[in-house]
Amino acid sequence: MTLPSSLAPAPAPVVTRFAPSPTGRLHLGHAYSALFAYHFAKDRGGRFILRIEDIDPSRCKAEYIDGIYEDLSWLGLDWDTPVRLQSQHHADYRAALQKLQDCGVLYSCFCTRKEIQDEISRAGYAPHGPEGALYPGTCRSLRGREAQTESPEQTAPFALRLDLAKALAMIPASHLFWQEWEEGAVPAQPDLLGDIVVARKDIGTSYHLSVVVDDALQGVTHVTRGVDLRYATPIQRVLQELLGLPVPQYVHHPLLTDERGQRFAKRDRSVTLQELRKSGLRPEDIRSKIRNEYSFFRQNNIQD
């Protein structure tokens, strides 16, 4: 039965997010990604969320969090508050980990990076994905795990990995796709990443796990991010299915590059928003540069 338009539920408001890691000052590429997410939501009457992905205490610094707020405010952006800092929500990630463990799709991995590389070298070849050589499955077997736990210095697992084969056996193949904005359904190929690390011993979570949990808890409807992160979507779809999380639409936008065609990076201080601000550039200069170079802003007639 089709409901009359007056009774049909209103479409969910668009919610986007910008989720930088505080490991350095924001650069032009960040500005483009933040403006993309901001205007995508605001032009549709939606909400823009800022999230701080600071799960790695060895690399993230409070001063860079303050820098993120300063740079985005200078650009003229506003966002919902309070801002979610991942470091304050480990209980949410532990609950998700427990659910995955209850599903029987995680295993303990004691391998160091050197041991993984040695195993790959002995095999002579290992399949490669976007993150490099795939984990060869050393600890996946019971024999491998028993051998490691017999060692007295191994008091806890270094990492928890996803047994991808077991996970895929639990998910209908018809569910393994995502909706890409203006592209439609895209088949997911999670095998390109293999048995990913879902949680590290020293952190208790991982990028892949925390991002799907946060997007669900914050009601994100459209994940807007650079095309360089498109590779992560298939494995995140697997985690969403296992955890029973809602599935957002995805909008993977092109990357802002320099005159050499190289993507901007935090190590290049000359293009940080802080340095550009010191050089005399105005926020409207940055917005104009981004808007003029990328078709999304032209086609959607985004204004300052």
Image (tube, rainbow, N blue to C red):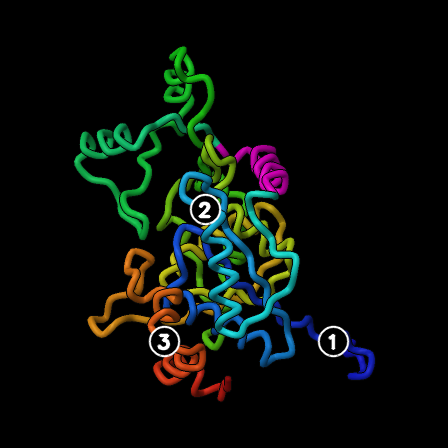
Kindly report the distance in space between the C-alpha atoms of the residues bearing marks 2 and 3: 26 Å
Q: Which mark is residue 158?
A: none
| Residue at left offset 33%, top offset 72% | 279
Residue 160, visible in the rendered structure: no
Return the x and y of residue 288 as percentages of the image width and height.
Answer: 40, 83
Three-letter amino acid code at disc 2?
Lys
Camera-nearest label, 1 or 2:
2
Secondary element type, mark 1: loop
Secondary element type, mark 3: loop
Badges 2 and 3: C-beta atoms under 8 Å apart?
Answer: no
Q: Main secondary structure of the magenta part?
A: helix
Residue 24, visible in the rendered structure: yes
The part of the image, by quadrant, that contains residue 284 is bottom left
Position of residue 219 in the picture relative to residue 293 (left or right): right
Kindly report the distance in space between the C-alpha atoms of the residues bearing marks 1 and 2: 41 Å
Magenta part of the protein: which range?
89-106
Secondary element type, mark 2: loop
The residue that disc 1 covers is: 10
| Residue at left offset 57%, top offset 67% | 16
Kindly report the distance in space between the C-alpha atoms of the residues bearing marks 3 and 1: 45 Å
The answer to which of marks 3 and 1 sits earlier in the sequence is 1
Q: Can you say whether 61 is above or below 118 in the image?
A: below
Q: Which mark is residue 280?
A: 3
Q: Quadrant of the N terminus?
A: bottom right
Frontmost residue, 170 versus 16: 16
Camera-nearest label, 3 or 1:
3
The residue that disc 2 covers is: 61
The part of the image, by quadrant, that contains residue 154 is top left
Q: Can you say whether 207 is above or below 108 in the image?
A: below
Three-letter amino acid code at disc 3?
Gly
The part of the image, by quadrant, that contains residue 77 is bottom right
| Residue at left offset 50%, top offset 63% | 70
